[in-house]
Amino acid sequence: MGLEGTISPQLGNLSFLIVLDLQGNSFHGELPHELLQLKRLKLLNLSNNDFVGEIPSRIGEISTFDIKGTIPHAIGQLRQLRYLSIGNNRLLSGMIPTTICNMSSLEVIYLANNSLSGEIPKEIGDLSQLKMVNLQDNFLVGNILMFNNTSLQYLYLGYNNMTGILPSNVCQELPNLRSLYLLHNDFYGAMPNVWHDCKELEDLELSLNNFDKGRIPADIGKLAKLQFLYLADNNLEGKIFLPIY
């Protein structure tokens, strides 16, 4: 489509609307507050447009929210939101607001392929319902965030500017982790021998970092469900020792 102009406030009269997908157009201006009247709306996709201003702070029944710009602090008021999807917008910049910790129902955070910067707020680690966090391909810095929950299954932090040593308790804190993507950062130090507690791990991507010279940790060989292992372009050396599980 090639639609342009502003969003009509009359959309708020479509009381049975469930899906509103306007992505990939040339809409501009602010979002009308009449969208708050769409109580049945479950998916709102406004990505790849030219909207300005803040997200209306009372949109609490939406499952997926796509927009570009900056992430307003008022987003923390969306306490019923389960899926936060604001990805693939290079004009989305700034820091991730700490108020995101108020969104206690969040199961998915998808902020990949943006221009976000700064550190990941540690408050995100307290969101106990999270199952997936995808912050890949931004300009984030700092160390890997630790999560205070056992429900997280997918953690994608690749293609950022993160650094530091991998925590030795990463698998103890995230026992149900299935995918861990940390590629193309600047993690350093010895690759920890802690993977035996990640019994559900299927994908482990640690390529393009700066780990100290050493061999592949032997306990990776105990990961019975592991399907994909990427360790390319590090400083690993010596024999590959992977005992049969």
Image (spheres, helix red, strand yellow):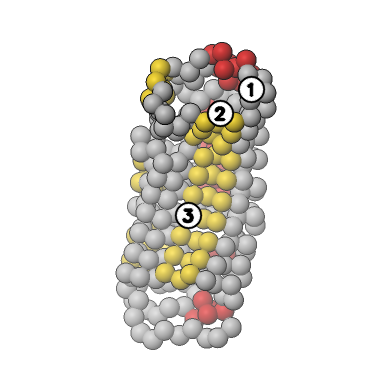
Question: Of marks 2 and 1, which one's residue comes earlier in the chain?
Answer: 2
Q: Residues within 10 Å of mark 1 (few under 14, many from 20)?
A: many
The first of marks 3 and 2 along the sequence is 2
Q: Amino acid at mark 2?
A: Leu
Q: Is residue 78 visible?
A: no
Q: Which residue is mark 3?
A: 156
| Label 3: how many Cα within 10 Å (few below 14, some 14–19, many 20+) | some
Check whether the beta carbons of the residues at disc 2 and disc 1 lie within 8 A of each other: yes
Quarter where residue 49 is shown: top left
Contact? badges 3 and 1 (CB < 8 Å)? no
Query: Could you say whether the residue bearing mark 2 is in a helix, strand or loop?
Result: strand
Residue 206, percent from left and from top: 41, 65
Q: Earlier in the sequence, mark 3 or mark 1?
A: 1
Say which of marks 2 and 1 sits in front.
2
Residue 106 in the figure: left or right of residue 238: right
Seen in the image, is 131 located left or right of residue 156? Answer: right
**Eyeballing the image, is 175 above or below 63?**
below
Q: CA distance from mark 3 to mark 2?
A: 28 Å
Residue labelled with disc 1: 38
Q: Position of residue 172 (x, y in %)?
A: 60, 65
